[in-house]
Image: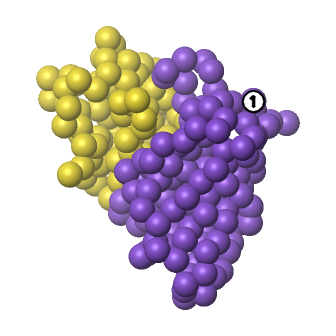
Chain colours: A yellow, B purple
Amino acid sequence: DQQVKQNSPSLSVQEGRISILNCDYTNSMFDYFLWYKKYPAEGPTFLISISSIKDKNEDGRFTVFLNKSAKHLSLHIVPSQPGDSAVYFCAVRTGKLIFGQGTTLQVKP
Amino acid sequence: DGGITQSPKYLFRKEGQNVTLSCEQNLNHDAMYWYRQDPGQGLRLIYYSQIVNDFQKGDIAEGYSVSREKKESFPLTVTSAQKNPTAFYLCASRGSGGYNSPLHFGNGTRLTVT
């Protein structure tokens, strides 16, 4: 029973355009959300996080939006760059981290 | 510079053999974790340890064992009881920056059992 779902296994965008990665969760009690980025044969690296008391958090080209009523969060990357091509995992903290399945982003030059 | 070292990067074993994956960190972190990544399934928690000499089962602990004799080290043993051991294994640690401090991951070990 997947508590955190990333329903799009892959996404392809053109360089310079916006990438939007989505994540849905099931439990309205979840209160802290994170995004990790992973290159092949490497460990994930922390990208950005958001607490449930906020609905937006921005860090450079990366912005995370949280819609608590819809139990949905999204990561926006703008402008997208070829180096952003990686697998992106959303995660929620519930005493431990629960990860989504990941979305593979390809940014084409 | 500080980080998490997993070795080896690639590991091959015959079915029925136990194998131990190494994880060492010099970040002075108390908490350490083992995750397993399979295609289309994200990262699943195997075991975690909040402090030396203490560890707890994660979501998929069957067929695995761990020890935490030193703060820096958290080795994972994949036993012959693990039915599908071939996977990418990731070790992580978390500092004392609070409940929401992010995990730091090693670069993983890809285990192939034939």
Q: Position of residue A36 (x, y in %)?
A: 49, 41
B45 over A9 or under it: above or below? above
Q: Residue at x 32, y 11 (%)?
A: A53
Q: Residue at x 59, y 54 (%)?
A: B66
Instruction: Pick whichever, B12 or B17, lies toward us.
Output: B17
Q: Residue at x 47, y 53 (%)?
A: B46
Q: Position of residue B21 (x, y in %)?
A: 67, 62
Q: Position of residue B51 (x, y in %)?
A: 62, 32
Q: Which residue is the extreme one toward the front?
A: B53
Q: Residue at x 55, y 50 (%)?
A: B34
Give the labeled residue for mark 1: B28
- Residue B5 lies left or right of residue B111; in this view the side is right
Q: Quadrant of residue B27?
A: top right
Is residue A10 visible to us here? no
- Label 1 neighbourhood size at 10 Å, few (<14), some (14-19), many (20+)? some
Instruction: Pick whichever, A16 or A25, lies toward us.
Output: A25
Q: SS class of the residue under badge 1?
A: loop
B64 over B54 or under it: above or below? below
Instruction: Pick whichever, B83 or B42, lies toward us.
Output: B83
Q: Position of residue A97 (x, y in %)?
A: 42, 37
Q: Chain of mark 1?
A: B
Q: Quadrant of residue A42?
A: bottom right
Q: Which residue is the extreme one toward the right?
A: B1
Q: Quadrant of residue A95?
A: top left
- Residue B99 lies left or right of residue B26; in this view the side is left
Instruction: Pick whichever, A78 or A67, lies toward us.
Output: A67
* Count of marks placed on residues: 1
**Residue kind at label 1, given as amino acid type:** Asn
Q: Which residue is the extreme one toward the left?
A: A69
B101 over B3 or under it: above or below? above
